[in-house]
């Protein structure tokens, strides 16, 4: 079975062969600018206390982080939306790792600003067996220090690709979270974090499971 990193590398090769060079250059330049900003440094990290939250899940039912933590540690994954192919690859990889995550005693949650209708579609498309929570207006992602606004130079490119971020998120903003993964102890402490302003980089599920087994 190929790793998530290998799957992403293969997708990147296909993208490089099919996308115009000027579009790829714009994407790379905006990603590099985000990498050079303070975004990665400002996010919550290992040793910090996790921000508690109450969010509706894909069924519209309110779920609380503290309720999940009452029973087990939590693996918390922030993703941009079901429109993002890298997010779908990550969600699929997490689903495949779900038995190992649960065997290690943890529960897996995903958080996204996409509306419940869209997150339900994402869940069904990827055949996910874990909860997806709706972070309206990126309020929770903001509390974790993960939010940025999609640069204006990318918006017409996304539009041509059929990606309507305000439509997916149900608001008029272009704010999305940097993908990030956390392991949170039952006491609410962040034990592991992965934050990368390059949206093509994701936490490897095998590493998440390894970290859980060290608890």
Image: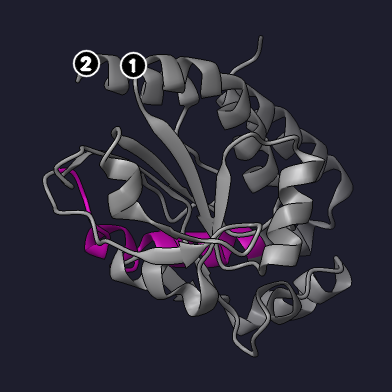
110 displayed left or right of 166:
left
Q: Are marks 2 and 1 in contact (CB under 8 Å)?
A: yes
Residue 37, horizontal then vertical, whole percent = 34, 68
Q: CA distance from mark 2 to mark 1?
A: 7 Å
Residue 128 against residue 167 in the figure, above or below? above
- Which residue sits furthest top? 1
Identify the main secondary structure in magenta.
Answer: helix
Confirm whether residue 194 shows in the render.
Answer: yes
Identify the image quadrant of the N terminus.
Answer: top right
Read off the magenta span. Answer: 27-46
Taking the magenta stretch, the answer to whether it contains residue 41 is: yes
Q: Which residue, given by chain and number where applicable, does mark 2 sit on? A: 214
Q: Which residue, given by chain and number where applicable, does mark 1 sit on? A: 210
Assess disc 2: are there few (<14), some (14-19) or many (≥20) residues with their C-alpha within 10 Å of its C-alpha: few
Residue 22, horizontal then vertical, whole percent = 76, 64
Confirm whether residue 193 shows in the render.
Answer: no
Residue 148, horizontal then vertical, whole percent = 45, 74
Question: Residue at coordinates 26% horizontally, 41% vertically from top-left?
Answer: 70
Residue 94 against residue 61 in the figure, above or below? above
For residue 154, which numbered disc appears in the image? none
Question: Residue at coordinates 63% horizontally, 84% vertically from top-left?
Answer: 152
Identify the image quadrant of the C terminus.
Answer: top left
Residue 30 against residue 88 in the figure, above or below? below
């Amino acid at each position: 079975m190929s790793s998530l990193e290998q799957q992403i590398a293969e997708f990147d090769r296909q993208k490089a062969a099919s996308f115009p060079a000027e579009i790829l250059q714009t994407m790379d330049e905006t990603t590099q600018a985000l990498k050079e900003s303070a975004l990665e440094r400002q996010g919550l990290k290992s040793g910090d206390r996790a921000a508690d939250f109450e969010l509706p899940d894909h069924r519209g039912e309110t779920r609380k982080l503290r309720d999940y933590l009452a029973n087990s540690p939590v693996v918390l994954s922030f993703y941009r939306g079901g429109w993002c192919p890298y997010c779908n690859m990550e969600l699929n990889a997490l689903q495949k790792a779900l038995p190992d995550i649960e065997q290690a005693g943890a529960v897996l949650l995903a958080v996204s600003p996409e509306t419940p209708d869209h997150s339900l579609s994402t869940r069904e498309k990827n055949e996910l067996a874990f909860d997806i929570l709706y972070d309206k207006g990126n309020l929770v992602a903001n509390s974790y220090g993960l939010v940025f606004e999609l640069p204006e130079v990318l918006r017409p490119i996304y539009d041509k690709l059929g990606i309507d971020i305000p439509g997916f998120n149900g608001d008029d903003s272009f704010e999305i979270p940097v993908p990030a993964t956390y392991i949170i102890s039952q006491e609410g402490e962040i034990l592991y974090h992965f934050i990368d302003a390059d949206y093509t980089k994701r936490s490897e599920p095998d590493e998440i499971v390894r970290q859980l087994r060290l608890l």
